[in-house]
Image: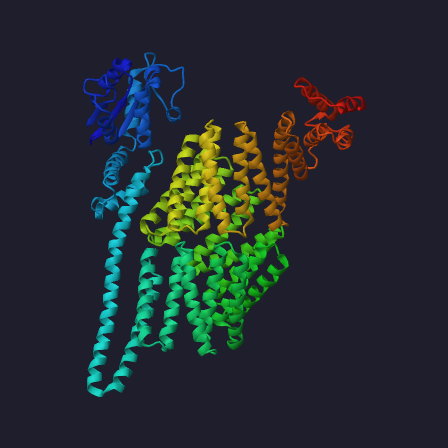
Amino acid sequence: MSEETRLFISYSPDDREKVETLCASLADEPGLTVFHGTEDSPDAPESRRHLEELIRSSDIFLFALSPRSAASEDCAWQFDLADSLNKRIIPVVVDHVDGTVPTALARLNYVHATDHDDLAIAVDNIRSAMATDIGWIREHTRLATLAHRWTAAARPGTQALRGPALHAAEDWLAEQPGDAPQPTAEQRRFILESRRATARRQRRTALGAVAALIVVGILGIVGWTQRNAARDGERMAEAALRSATEASGTLLSELAQEFSSATLPADTRRRILVQAQDLHGDLMQNFPGDRALRATAAMTQTRVGDTLFHSGDLRSSRKAYLGARDKQMALLAETPDHTGRQHALAVTTERLGDLAMAKGNPAEAREHYETALDLSLTLDDVDPSLGRHGAGTAAILDKLGQRALNENDLSAAEVLFTQAHDLRAALLRREPANPDWQSAYADSLSSLASLAQARDTPAAARDLLEQALEIRETLVGLAPENAAFKHETAVLLEALAAIARAEGDADQSRTYLEKRLDLARALAQSNPLNEGWQHDLAVSLFDAGTADQKAGEYAAAKAYFEQGRRTIQRLVLISPIDLQWQYELGKVEMRLAQLAELMDEPVAAKTQFEAAGEIFATLASEQPDNPAYASDLGMVFFSLGTHANQTDDPDSARQNHEKALDWRRRAAELLPGDPGTRRAVTGSLYEIAALQEESKDYDAALEGYREMLDHARNLVAAFPQDSDLADDLRVAGDLFARQAAIVSFGDVLFSRLDKAETLAREALEAAPDNRRVAAHLAYALMFQDETDAAKEIFLAGRGAEIDGDPWEEVVQQDFDTFRKIGLTHPLMKEVEAAF
């Protein structure tokens, strides 16, 4: 190692001699500086604060493991600090340990350097561990130090990374070796906020330049107008100013179009489009009746909505779309036969349908799509040569067909998909060589394939997809630089992979996935700044990893997921204020956490669930009305609660499950029409009640199960056709009745007979077949001298079983319990005689 490597050794004073032997063997290591972490060492720090600084500044943390260090509070504190800082930790066993060691330490690979081991081999192993990825690890230490100072100083902009230093940090983050320690959350925030600060500076510069360009252009035209006004009078001045207005509108329109498709970060595009929109507003104040200017303003506002929609800001995108629609409807009221404005309104209305789908409101989406379809069909009548209107009509028919397919209305889906197919076939017959119409026809084949899959005819679906794939691959061959054709081909390959996977042909599925991954890599490499292609690459990597995960090849799956995470990290760096990529990064952490659970790595799973939760919480604070963030936070806390329960930490389990319930309720409020989101609330209610039952808080558990039962009933009432919800209701009824049996028996024992009777009747309403509750109702009635009703229940139960035991035997045992505490009734002997 040519550069300095800083090694911190944590050990018990009783092991000093063995540690010094290790240090002597490492003494000839070039550039190695060693810090000792025991207060018994002569050069050790005198305070924990100083000790913390040494650990923070070290590249490698070596833990000398022995029975003494395993039991040492000081060593435990040092290890916990190093682990929280994601240091590379090398556990070296200097004496055999029979007892327990910290969980995070136990999962690491040990180097054995006891008196019974070969010291030379142990030293070589230590050197190898220190040398692995040491350049990356040294940078980990340096950036961690900078990030800590930045945080401690309340995150001042002056301490943020800039220029080459920022680029180097971003490269470091994206190029993390597979076996290297994870960057800390503080490091990620430091780099991300540095990029955000740079983006803000660049954005201010870009926007200022754009504004200056536009203003200079407008002022030049206005100046020319004023000169003409002085020369030719007021009439010619007004005409010239109107000409200037139109020229400015054209300039803004072209600018908006250019920036809407540019490979700039989404937030920069959005802000430039918003500025263009605002300048349109200023111009419209001078000429409120200028229709061309108003149409351009509406178009720009639609593009603003598109950019906001793709960045995940659904509320703001809806506002932009509605504003554009209002402008377009006002223009159409003045010029009802203007086909261009009808087309623009159809496009904006279709976008509102897409937005409604993203917000989980399919009924609203259908209304918007049907309105857009009516407009588009009107245009088809006006324009019998089809063209763009026919293509737009087909696209809307496809979306309506997909809605019908999602609602399992296969007949309606077939009609709609077939209409779209026929329109596209007509376009293709008119221009067989038109690549756009060929591509659109392939879209219809894909839609019909999804219908075939819904009808459980995979062979038909595969045939349609293969036809579509043949068209796509031909298009790619004719236009190898056309990224859209490559992307659409990749989508088809994924669909074919899914069919092959469902049919059990894992090899064929893998072939399709690898072809798709090759296309995605080529697209991403062709334009590293194109966020769409980078995202497609990440999705392809995740799909390949998922296939390996399902096949039980967890190490391969992890490698793919980590590659996908690095790709998403690049997207965050390209567009740090685009919430979509931060959200995707949180989803990657979730994938890795769930994989860690399968690999039986609970500590890693917990760490990654927490990392995902931190990302989702930040997003939820910025967009509190986004249901996806609330739903995913619910899943994160649910998983953390399950982890805590499995590790015998009931307090943490309860706290996390309560947080999960809060977020799931929030998601259900935001998506009231989604049964799956509301069903998740049922799951959290169950977990909380079950924890209360485990802690023997039976009354609280009863209330928890009752709340779960009420929620399940409400869901069945809202979605009566959903069989999963009906199953949930039956389970909730059984759980409530089981808990009611425990509580009602106690009520009988303590002579709370009215309460016992009421609870037992409530439980039997929820679970009529629960014989134990029926017995408890009979006991409550008997001791209230409602002898005939009690006797009827006792005799009706003969021959039945309670939890596998004969009814008569269980009742007899309960009678014996009553007698032991002094409870008796004449009916008891009569029932025993009848038994």
Above or below residue 616? Residue 831 is above
Residue 295, given in percent of the width and then of the height, sits at 39, 73
What's the colour scheme? rainbow
Residue 271 visible, this orientation:
yes
- With 170 as the anchor, is 677 left or right in this view? right
Residue 83, given in percent of the width and then of the height, sits at 33, 29
- The mark tally for this picture is 0
The C terminus, quarter of image? top right
Above or below residue 786? Residue 304 is below
Front-most of 343 and 426? 343
Front-most of 162 and 286? 286
- With 261 as the anchor, is 773 left or right in this view? right
The N terminus, quarter of image? top left
The answer to which quarter of the image holds residue 68 is top left
- With 94 as the anchor, is 749 left or right in this view? right
Q: Residue furthest top?
A: 115
Q: Residue at x 56, y 48 (%)?
A: 675
Q: Residue at x 77, y 28 (%)?
A: 798
Residue 429 visible, this orientation:
no
Front-most of 565 and 37? 37
Q: Residue at x 25, y 43 (%)?
A: 155
Above or below residue 15? Residue 79 is below
Q: Residue furthest right?
A: 834
Residue 156, given in percent of the width and then of the height, sits at 23, 45
Residue 744, given in percent of the width and then of the height, sits at 64, 30
